[in-house]
Amino acid sequence: MITLKGKHIYLRALEPEDLEFIHVIENNESIWEISNTQTPYSKFLIKQYLENAHKDIFEVKQLRLVISNYDDEALGLIDLFDFDFKNSRAGIGILIKESNDRGKGYGNEALKLLINYSFTHLGLHQLYCSVSEDNEASIKLFTKQGFEKVGEKKDWNRVNGVYKNEYLFQLINNLNVY
């Protein structure tokens, strides 16, 4: 049985009812740096995206799940992207929407669930992520789950006129179990 349920949260597929939640996240300029977003998204575009969210990861090369608590409140999103079947790898990203929900272990639990799913059900060999040098919370989150810093991209992203370095982290499933 595939389980994407943790002690405090569970991961679920996107639903049409998530339109407003995703619209708010995608149009929050304070987090555009994390997602490399440059322009706002319309509700129309997000609605189209949601209409296709049921497609298989092998077809669309990505999987976006909602992080929900057991009161069925959406807390954030966690993504697999750039799914590469041939090389058995994918990028991974995570966001907890509200700052007062961060630091409570929800992200850690969600990341652990998706890592396990990626290795045991999707048969991936590795996951990777890119994190800005000043995003200490994400660096701590990913290293806690065993990701290793394997590279640094100098002056990679320009944010408010300032260039920032970005770190590349990687988690390799050496034993093909997690």
Image (cartoon, rainbow, N blue to C red):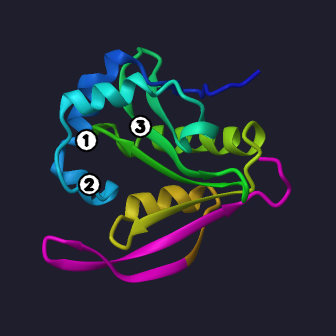
Element class at badge 2: loop
Element on which disc 1 rests: helix
Mark nearer the viewer, 3 or 1: 1
In the image, residue 45 sits, relative to residue 136, either above or below, namely: above
Q: Tell me where residue 156 sits by quadrant.
A: bottom left
x and y percent of residue 38 in the render? 20, 56
| Pair 3/2: label in front | 2
| Disc number placed over residue 77 in the picture, else none | 3
Which amino acid, mark 1? Answer: Glu
Q: Amino acid at mark 2?
A: Thr
| 122 or 173, nearer to the observer | 122
In the image, which disc is placed on residue 37? 2
Query: What residue is pinned by disc 1?
Result: 26
For the stretch drawn in magenta, the main secondary structure is strand
- Was residue 152 drawn as part of the magenta stretch in this picture? yes
Residue stretch rendered in magenta on the structure: 151-178
Give the percent coordinates (x, y) of residue 27: 19, 42
Q: Quadrant of residue 18?
A: top left
